[in-house]
Amino acid sequence: MATMFSGRLAALSESFTAATMAKLISDTAAETKKIGKQLQRGYDRLLELNSNKSEVAAPLIDGIRKQDGDTEFESFFIRTLDHLGVEVEELGSRGYLLKTGPGQSASLPGLTPDGAMFTFDRPRALSREDVGFLSQDHPVVRAAIESILGMETGNSVFGVWKSDLPGAVFLEVHLVLECVAPPNLHADRFLPATPLRVVVDQTLADRGDDEAFRDAPLSAGDVFGLIDTPVFKKKHLPAMLGKAIEIGTARKDSLIIAARNKASEQYSAEIERLTDLAQLNRSVTPAEIASLESAKSALIAALSEPTLRVDALKLVLRTSP
């Protein structure tokens, strides 16, 4: 304000009149009111962006409550710990004492030979400081699942499907689409590691929507009887795998476009907000806006070229009973 009216103040100090003084006071009051309205509009915009929206929060709260009561996840995780060699001792309803076992195959954070108490019951965890709450985001849960996913065991499987339908061979391929980018970009907010399931048969037809195959009862069989067949090993199997990767590659385009659009919209909104705020607040520097624009460009570039890798294979032979 002083900078804006410095010239008139200097002139007034050299030649003072009551009318000039009154005019200056009137103009500064009007300018103060104008700036106040601009600041208020900026405040309202920030408040609107960060205020609670019940229609948005309600589905999230319902989802959290459903996860808290999901006993299937609890059963799955306890089986996972048992598979990893963790000693599990039940402590009443949904409570467990977890200890590192002598044959434990993975290092899990927070577990010691003396054990640590955990529960899947949120109210109980909130009332007991010595009891940890196990949710799908807990470090122990994430580390256990990542350990299972990182094992080579289970990456490939063979099964025999006995059916009255004509004989056939199916290859189910699980691909993972993931974005490799610097950690500071947090690209997984827009494109997390995404699994893609593709199923093809020996004719290279897409059978991903085949419900009969999805629900087929499989039994163990001798995979070498099929793999050792020269024509299948050298011709059919490579062709089926190549076709599955081709189908997965075609599907990834829509995921990439959606991720790029989401990232662009979010960053553009933030850049626009900072640009508007910079007109009212000198602490928002051009360098800060330029940094955000640079991060947006780097993120869009990274999201444009994610990698698609083969994560697991399932080979199924359909034969007569």
Image: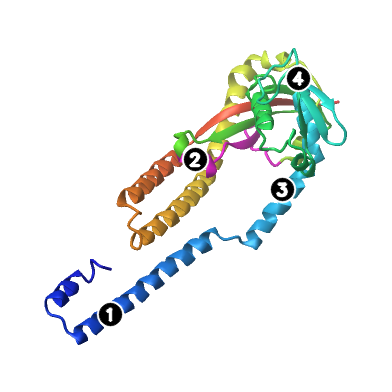
Identity of the amino acid at label 4?
Asp
Magenta region, residue range: 185-209
Q: Residue at x 55, y 29 (%)?
A: 309
Q: Kindly check if marks 3 and 2 are in contact, taking CB atoms under 8 A apart as contact.
A: no
Kindly identify which residue carries mark 3. 64
Quarter of the picture holding the C terminus: top right
Mark nearer the N terminus (2 vs 4): 4
- Where residue 246 appears, as percent x and y from the top left, is 54, 34
Question: In whole angstroms, how far apart are the C-alphas of marks 2 and 1?
Answer: 54 Å
Kindly identify which residue carries mark 4. 114
- Is 227 magenta? The answer is no
Question: In whole angstroms, how far apart are the C-alphas of marks 4 and 1?
Answer: 76 Å
Q: Residue 2 versus residue 179: which sits nearer the camera?
A: 2
Mark nearer the N terminus (2 vs 1): 1
Question: In whole angstroms, how far apart are the C-alphas of marks 2 and 4?
Answer: 39 Å
> Horizontal placement of 275 versus 73: left or right?
left
Q: Residue at x 38, y 48 (%)?
A: 292
Farthest residue to the bottom: give it.
19
Q: Residue 230 versus residue 221: which sits nearer the camera?
A: 221
- Where residue 293 appears, as percent x and y from the top left, is 36, 48
Kindly identify which residue carries mark 2. 187
Q: Residue at x 70, y 42 (%)?
A: 209
Q: Secondary structure at mark 1?
A: helix
Identity of the amino acid at label 1?
Ile
Mark nearer the N terminus (3 vs 2): 3
